[in-house]
Image (tube, rainbow, N blue to C red):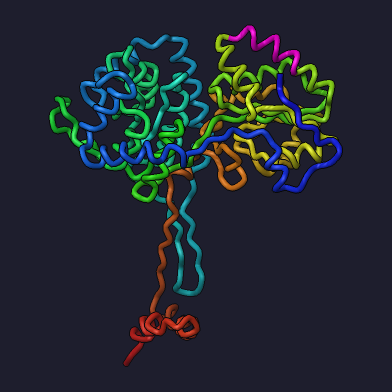
Amino acid sequence: MLTRTDLRSGLPARAELREVMPRAEVNVDAVLDQVRPIVAAVAERGVDAALELAERFDRVRPESIRVPAEALSRALEDLDPAVRDALATSIVRARKVHADQRRQDVVTQVAAGGTVTERFIPVRRVGLYAPGGLAVYPSSVVMNVVPAQAAGVESLVVCSPPQAEHRGLPHPTIMAAAAMLEVDEVWAVGGAQAVALLAYGGTDTVDQGAGAVLEPVDLVTGPGNAYLTAAKRLLRGLIGIDAEAGPTEIAVLADHTADAVHVAADLISQAEHDPFAASVLVTTSYELADAVDAELERQVAATKHTERIRTALTGRQSGTVLVASIDDGIAVVDGYAAEHLEIQTEDAGNVARRVRNAGAIFVGPWAPVSLGDYCAGSNHVLPTGGCARHSGGLSVQTFLRGIHLVEYTQAALREVADQVVTLANAEDLPAHGQAVTARFRA
């Protein structure tokens, strides 16, 4: 089922390796021109434009953008107890991991009387996006809200598309997850218009009330489709963003010890997200590759979303890469820089620690990616499209800014004054030096 790339005779140069690897093609530039008028309409007409766009794209016009408090409470009351318990487990574990990420202020004494303090200040107001397309993602609410709360963000708003089958409200499970996390501000708005409304704010139209202000945010996080990503790109600067997310990815580095049933199931689990999802097997074992293909044929036929999964697995973004050794396999997965990377090899722990580029690494046969999606405690909002070479996943640090406080006494400034003047003159910026010497004139 998976196409094959045979690199057993030797690896190409790094730049060429990136070219031969399977990869989803997402051209955000191609949709920018479609997104510009959406952003402009919301910038000009605020909530009215967002409601009209919801009617156009989501086939429903919400009564208001802000979800009434009673709708959040009702969604939580009506939530399946088993789902509520599972979400509670996810929240507890995510909070445990993210609590340990909070950084402490650091004071460095540079000289007698001269200190630099690095303070970590949370972003004041954040918009968190939960998609509502082919699937429903209450887990994304957890993964966005928990690190923001751990960082100390003062004001949170969750956005999710209005659903025609739920009278213009977001999916009830999304609302219930927000309520469990004690987020009381939820907006029924999706796609590019959601990012624009978060950036510009507006005034809601009905009582909850009439004239209720929807305050703009400082940062937007959360995954979405190419249109949402294009809006993030257009508005970056006015707002901060976490990343430009593309289709989900899994790479599995495996040898002859891997269980083909497990590998196939894990590749399928990510292909289930989207027809453009990428599932890549990198292996030293030709026999395993054959066994995985056979398992894929058997398991895909038995899944709920067979057509979607088969489209993803047979697309150019998915495939098997055969390598001569685990060393070569590590080089390949480092070049690919997968959003999710599984290591199913002998001595998996040591192999995993040799990997440089991945959004998250799942070690051994008992740590599938789906564990990380829900209940590992790790965050599942991760870099895609090779961005794991330079970026990490969503964390408490996403919501913090390091600010330096520089405190010098007169004596400490005098001690370094000549060096400041010398460097200012070397850069032909004499006024910089004069800003120091002016303080010491008799």
Which of the 4 image quarters holds residue 213?
top left
Q: Is residue 301 magenta?
A: yes
- Relative placement, left or right, of 207 versus 235 is left
> What secondary structure is the stretch in magenta mostly built from?
helix
Camera-side residue of 11 and 33:
33
Residue farthest bottom in this picture? 442
> In the displayed structure, would residue 281 be above or below residue 167?
below
Q: Please report the residue visible at 69 percent of the width from the left and 22 percent of the height from the top.
A: 366
For image coordinates 25% across by 21% down, the residue present is 61
Residue in the foreground of this view, choosing between 249 and 11: 11
- Range drawn in magenta: 293-303
Q: Residue at x 42, y 9 (%)?
A: 80
Q: Is residue 287 above or below residue 123?
A: above
Outermost residue, top side: 302
For the C terminus, give its image quadrant.
Answer: bottom left
Q: Is residue 123 visible?
A: no
